[in-house]
Amino acid sequence: MSRDERLEVLVIGGGIAGQSVCEELAGTATIALACAEPHLPYDRVNLGKLLTGATLGELQLRPGSWYADHDIDVHVDAPIAALDPAAGVATTAAGLELSFDRAVLCTGSDALVPPIAGIDAMGVEVFRGPADCERIASAATGCTHAAVIGGGLLGLEAAYALATLGVAVSVVHLMDRLMERQLDAPAAELLAPAIAQLGVDVRLAHATEEVLHDAGGHVRALRFADGTQLDCDLVVVAVGIRPQVALAREAGLEVNRGIVVDDALTTSHPRVLAVGECAEHRGVVHGIVAPIHDQAAIAARVLRGDGDGVYTGSVPTAKLKVMGIDLVTAGDAEGGHAVVVRDEPSGAYRKLVVRDGRAAGAVLLGDIRGAELLLDAVRTAAPVDDALDLLSSASEATAAELPDAAQVCNCNGVCKGEIVDAIREQQLGSTQEVVAVTRAGAGCGSCRPVVSELLAIERGGAAEEATYLCPCRKQTREQLAACVREHDLESVSDLSAACGAGRDCGACKPGLAYLVSEVRGNRHREERHARFINDRVHANIQNDGSFSVVPRMRGGVTSADELRRIADVVDRYEIPMVKVTGGQRIDLLGVRKEQLPAIWEELGMPSGHAYAKAVRTVKTCVGTDFCRFGLGDSIRLGIDLETAMEGLYTPHKVKSAVSGCPRNCAEAYVKDIGLVAVEGGWEVYVGGAAGGTVRKGDLLAKVDTPDDAKRLALVFLQHYREHAEYHERSYGYVERVGIDAIRASVLDPENAAALLERYRIARAATDPDPWRERHDPVSPKQFAELDSEPEPLVGPPAGAAT
Amino acid sequence: MTALAEGTWVDVGAARDVPLMEGRSVRLAGGRVAIFRLPDGWAAVEHACPHKGGPLSDGIVGDRCVTCPLHNWRFDLDTGEQIGGGAQLRTFQVREREGRLELAT
Ligand code: SRM
Ligand SMILES: Cc1cc2nc3c(=O)[nH]c(=O)nc-3n(C[C@H](O)[C@H](O)[C@H](O)COP(=O)(O)OP(=O)(O)OC[C@H]3O[C@@H](n4cnc5c(N)ncnc54)[C@H](O)[C@@H]3O)c2cc1C
Ligand code: SF4
Ligand code: FES
């Protein structure tokens, strides 16, 4: 078919449904996509991530270039206000007319807000779009108690997100058990305590009758049918969806709860189809994504007029995206003939429902082994002779035994066959690539282990290819390091010229800059354009474009003299905030770029590198000097270690601590490098974390003296500098390669000596205090804009020793 | 570039104050403008990122695009379009004359 004869399809609504229709049709029709929201299609399934710091860009389903590459004409911020099926014309709110041969309504739904008295009070939010998340996140700061109305999938996810933000939260549910649509009573009974374990208060059989508000109209409590109340200052309503049918209704299409479609997903007008949460098929409106992909595939077939375009419905499946709780369900949770395996102490529950000799439903809680196999059996209504045998053999099944048609990724509707074909045809080598190409695992992410397993099978067990440091040019860290060595390259520009890395989007330039400096032992040519702004001005950029200043305070130890100078600087430069950090030092926040050199000069203290992927802090406790339990001089060793490491850049930040005894007051067990004095020596821990991830470090070794401990810490530091991927914290690195591999490297005397030597070379070639650039800026306006000048340096203060 | 009447160019600073592949900003009547030195010339766009006002002159430049230092929105420096999004920056004409930078207003 020539392009002119192609069918013109208008897709109305850029949610997951609209996107899925575009994916199915791409290349076979001329497509226009009208999105009401001011964004390209994004992944609503992962909306909760916006609450914990992700940006909408990270949730975007496809980059802008994808639409251009597939000849799809996208209009964002362009709600369709009128649709004339007979004339084949749709008009946007701004008056733009879009003509079509066929249109697909993918208008999705709004959150359902039940008619409860007072529900329009301030502080009552729904959980459906980015703007809701922004409001919830800002209300969560300073919130004393939040209530989530609704104990279904969405409500539990909202409660979990709030609990993660540190908000005290109650889930208030009308029914006497959680997730009654997906779970049978015994499973729901096991789920409730697991949710409570996350710090979420669960209140079942609570019918909310009224939202009470204060004089200012802000919610203050919920009142229930039994007369009791729950004080709260934030309410999230998550009780269900309301399909967006207004446009269809005005266009004269048949509308019930959703837009009514037949088995060809066609509405009451033959030119118009409907797909997704807005569609009602055989009386059912689906509120999850797996059916959307089924529908989109059929709709595309109907539009192209090829094959049998008959949709007979989808089996609903659900996965709970709450960390630490594994829960997968499909089809019916009750009825028919059921076999149940239940492990009381662990709380695991596995159930298979069989009706008329065919798989009809599954509930897997706490132990979801074999979920893909069981879901496939339910989805295809596979004949089941021996239900107990299927349930138990499923838990042994590996990805190899899955049928090709088994859906692996429910979020994006990708089956095993497609993944395996993509790996073979495009010779994919890493999970990261498979996810990017197939989109399997790009949704909630729970199927990623299976994707990795399939990849491992295809690669015959060979290790995965490393992640790319420059994804645009598919170059790994090892390849690039080899290139630097082989051609003796001195800078990022040299490297770009030699192999193209860093030429395209530029996002990898800071990683390349680190790589070049590391490989060359810091005897490289520094290029500031390859560095993030923090490393151009040696300060951490803040949300308002100002910077923070954190001077080094080795081991957390300071003096009256330093404190006096800090106080003077705060006064003189009217610093809006002085704060003791979690890293045992002091942060001056809200500083203008132009003030940085003068402030550094007056502080007379070296940089603490609090802005860089570099050695940060070594926290200490008071140790033998003062503490009655002290077994080792932790302050002394902490200061020594920090002095030895400071100024070195690393793949990601490195934070350390030294504790004087196993009571661990300096939190050494949860640091990248942690030293703990024990009876008769020192323990060296690596790979600990207590940030977004909490992980106790692995014991690398026990050594005899403080010097040995320091030496081993330095050897590990250099090992990490040379082997970790850029942006990989030690906790990720240690977890990935395993402590045994690290021991083999750093405890081998010859290798350790070589690592120590390379550490010394790198340390000798670096200036531990980049703040000295105040005297010798790398460019005239390093610390200023075109129309401003850096503030003049006032002479060095008394007593300063950098 | 369309011809502009003489006198609509304003001097905004010294070209050497903007290092290669970096940006610096300057205040104009309508707000701050970020000026970038690219390997083959200059580009200028509005300075405040439409997302949350991040300082675009502090961003990393690559492939004639700048990445905002706050949350990584990316913009084409020639067209002002956001890559992979709907936001749009105002663009300005900028030229170098005898070591000075001039913006068309
Ligand atoms: C200032 C400080 C908070 C405070 O007031 O106490 C702080 C502030 C920031 N932390 Fe932190 N962290 C601070 C101690 C910590 C600690 C505690 C510690 O160091 O002992 C942790 C947990 C330990 C750890 O690192 O795992 C910590 C875990 C994080 C994380 C999570 C890292 C992780 O992988 O889980 C981030 C985000 C990241 O790195 O991507 C982060 C990122 C940040 C950034 C840099 C966010 C950013 O990119 O702008 C914050 C800068 C704020 C600003 O505008 O200046 N900060 N941050 C602390 C500075 C310590 C210092 O003296 O250098
Ligand atoms: C927080 C959250 C978590 C979830 N988690 C899961 C999960 O784990 N698993 C799962 O399967 N499902 C989950 N879901 C449900 C899933 O996200 C939805 O089923 C799915 O996104 C619906 O897609 P849709 O395209 O049909 O509708 P929508 O996402 O609502 O998209 C419709 C789009 O059309 C636009 N539109 C409406 N009217 C017009 C018009 N007149 N002109 C132009 N555009 C218009 C809307 O603005 C919207 O952008 C979750 C939902 C939420 C909110
Ligand atoms: S200082 Fe750390 S914990 Fe606090 S808001 Fe910033 S990143 Fe989050
Ligand atoms: S302010 Fe620019 S990306 Fe957020």
Image (spheres, rainbow, N blue to C red):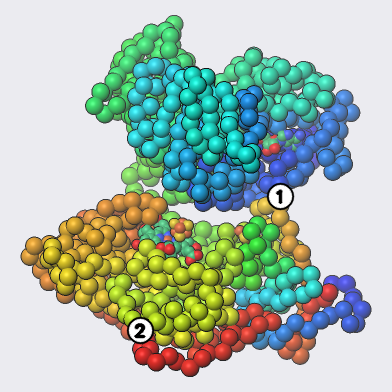
Q: Which residue is mark 1?
A: A68
The residue positioned 36% from the left and 66% from the top of the image is A583
Q: Residue furthest front?
A: A215
Q: Residues within 10 Å of mark 1 (few under 14, many from 20)?
A: few
Task: Say which chain tag 1 marks.
Answer: A
- On screen, residue A529 above or below A779: above
Q: Quadrant of the N terminus of chain A?
A: top right
Residue A679 at what x, y percent from top left?
8, 62
To the question of a shared chain for discs 2 and 1, the answer is yes
The mark nearer the N terminus, 2 or 1, is 1
Residue drawn at point x = 19 percent, y = 63 percent:
A676
- The three-letter amino acid code for the residue at tag 1 is Ala
- Give the total of numbered labels: 2
CA neighbours of label 2 inside 10 A, class few (<14), some (14 to 19), many (20+): few
**Residue drawn 77% across the image and 39% down it:** A79
Which residue is tagged 2?
A561
Q: Evaluate whether residue A255 shows in this view.
A: yes
| Image x and y of residue B42, in percent | 72, 76
Image coordinates of residue B76 in percent, x first then y, are 69, 63
- Could you tell me which residue is drawn at 47 percent across and 67 percent down? A511
**What amino acid does circle 2 point to?**
Asp
Q: Is residue A701 left or right of residue A241?
A: left
Q: Where is residue A618 shown, x and y percent of the image?
A: 30, 69
**Residue A416 seen anywhere in this rendered image of the structure:** no
Q: Callout 2: helix, strand or loop?
A: helix
In what element is the residue under mark 1?
A: helix
Instruction: Pick the residue in front: A154 or A396.
Output: A154
Ligand 4 lies in quarter = bottom right
- The chain holding disc 2 is A
Which residue occupies the foreground of this view, A471 or A57?
A57
